[in-house]
Image (spheres, rainbow, N blue to C red):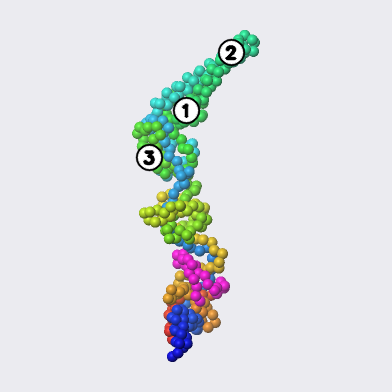
């Protein structure tokens, strides 16, 4: 054997080993009776625009701007707790009633400053008239006006302190009219939302700024997704996130800048953009750990098929397309999986009828043909 013959034989042998069986035989001849006997079911290709990229766990959290801790604005003893965990509350609703002796002192100082301002107002009007009549000097009028302004500033300061302490403006106005002191302080909800945690207990004495309730507005929720570091390059801001067994979708808005050294994952944040409910209960809840799937929109032609329609051989994937003689073996590329379905691409138009079930039997028939060759 000369060198040319040896090289030709080597090339043919290598091509035979490297080429999948479809190179030898790409058509499986079957009659309709054989198709029925093998239990083969035909189906259609379904065109898709979204490709599954990654399945990863996620935790449902409340955005920091939507979560509030209601605290005691003054030290005192808790008389009544008005809300329980899980209650829906409205902004301004009374959550806690406190008995606060310190509030009495603040109310007394406010009433004193209010009385001083009223007396100062009388002196202000009197000296203003006397100045107009030329009875008093300009200097005395300026002193009276300055003193009256100081009274006004003091009243405004005491009023704001009472408001910070927890009294509403209508309650402060009522105090100024009735002059009736009260040590009872109502703590109001700063937002409309849901009670997530009750921290205080009735009858307990609490200090100023002691936490009483944790409240959250659940109109917006976030998903914190752990992305394996080896998949960081395949995820980008704007990708859609699907939650298993729910109609909810989210959109990735942030990719973290550091990898968690404990589990080597990157934190991705997604905002839920579709929040549907089952009855009165939300599908997802804060604190939940759920399975998510990240999908991307593709401009290339891709199709969805059942996993049972795909045959695998020597690392290659194939589907079986119905033709007049039986089935054509067509190589495809699996670019994603979604439950019991796979996303494929290949030399396909979308009009083909494929074997959606029975691919195992067709594969066995196909490989036996290839070995016979």
Residue identified by numbered label 1: 161
Residue 150 x/y as whole percent: 52, 20
Does residue 315 appear anywhere in the picture? yes
* Element assignment for label 3: loop
Residue hosting label 3 = 199
Q: Nearer the viewer, mark 2 or mark 3?
A: 2
Please give the name of the residue rendered at 64% of the width and 10% of the height, measured from the top-left corner.
Answer: 134
Check disc 1 and report its element: helix, strand or loop.
helix
Spatial CA span between label 3 and label 1: 25 Å
Check the image and report above or below for 195 versus 300.
above
Q: 373 above or below 239?
A: below
Q: Which residue is mark 2?
A: 139
Within 10 angstroms of label 1, few (less than 14), some, or many (20 or more) residues?
A: some
Magenta span of residues:
330-352
Q: Could you say where residue 358 lies in the image, as x and y percent from the top left?
A: 45, 76
| Residue 251 pos. (x, y %) | 51, 54
């Amino acid at each position: 054997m000369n060198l040319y013959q040896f090289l030709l034989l080597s090339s043919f042998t290598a091509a035979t080993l490297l080429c999948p069986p479809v190179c030898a035989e790409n058509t499986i001849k079957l009659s309709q009776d054989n198709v029925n006997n093998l239990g083969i079911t035909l189906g259609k290709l379904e065109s898709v625009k979204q490709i599954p990229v990654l399945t990863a766990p996620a935790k449902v959290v409340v955005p920091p701007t939507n979560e509030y801790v209601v605290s005691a604005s003054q030290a005192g003893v808790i008389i009544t707790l008005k809300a329980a965990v899980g209650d829906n509350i409205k902004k301004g609703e009374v959550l806690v009633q406190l008995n606060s002796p310190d509030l009495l002192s603040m109310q007394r100082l406010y009433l004193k400053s209010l009385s001083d301002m009223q007396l100062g107002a009388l002196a202000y009007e009197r000296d203003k008239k006397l100045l107009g009549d030329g009875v008093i000097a300009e200097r005395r009028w300026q002193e009276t006006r300055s003193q009256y302004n100081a009274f006004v500033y003091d009243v405004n300061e005491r009023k704001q302190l009472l408001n910070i302490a927890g009294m509403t403006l209508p309650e402060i106005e009522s105090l100024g009219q009735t002059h009736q002191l009260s040590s009872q302080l109502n703590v109001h909800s700063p937002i409309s939302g849901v009670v997530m945690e009750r921290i205080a207990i009735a009858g307990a004495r609490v200090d100023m700024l002691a936490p009483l309730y944790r409240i959250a507005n659940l109109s917006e929720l976030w998903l914190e997704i752990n992305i394996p570091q080896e998949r960081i390059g395949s995820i980008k801001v704007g990708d859609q996130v699907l939650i298993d067994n729910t109609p909810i979708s989210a959109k990735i808005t942030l990719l973290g800048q550091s990898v968690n050294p404990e589990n080597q994952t990157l934190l991705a944040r997604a905002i839920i953009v579709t929040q549907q409910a089952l009855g009165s209960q939300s599908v997802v809840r804060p604190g939940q750990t759920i399975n998510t799937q990240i999908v991307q929109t593709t401009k290339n032609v891709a199709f969805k098929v059942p996993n049972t329609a795909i045959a695998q051989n020597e690392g290659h994937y194939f589907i079986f397309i119905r033709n007049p003689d039986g089935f054509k073996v067509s190589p495809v590329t699996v670019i994603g999986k979604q439950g019991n379905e796979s996303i494929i691409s290949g030399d396909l138009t979308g009009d083909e009828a494929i074997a959606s079930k029975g691919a195992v039997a067709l594969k066995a028939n196909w490989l036996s043909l290839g070995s016979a060759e």
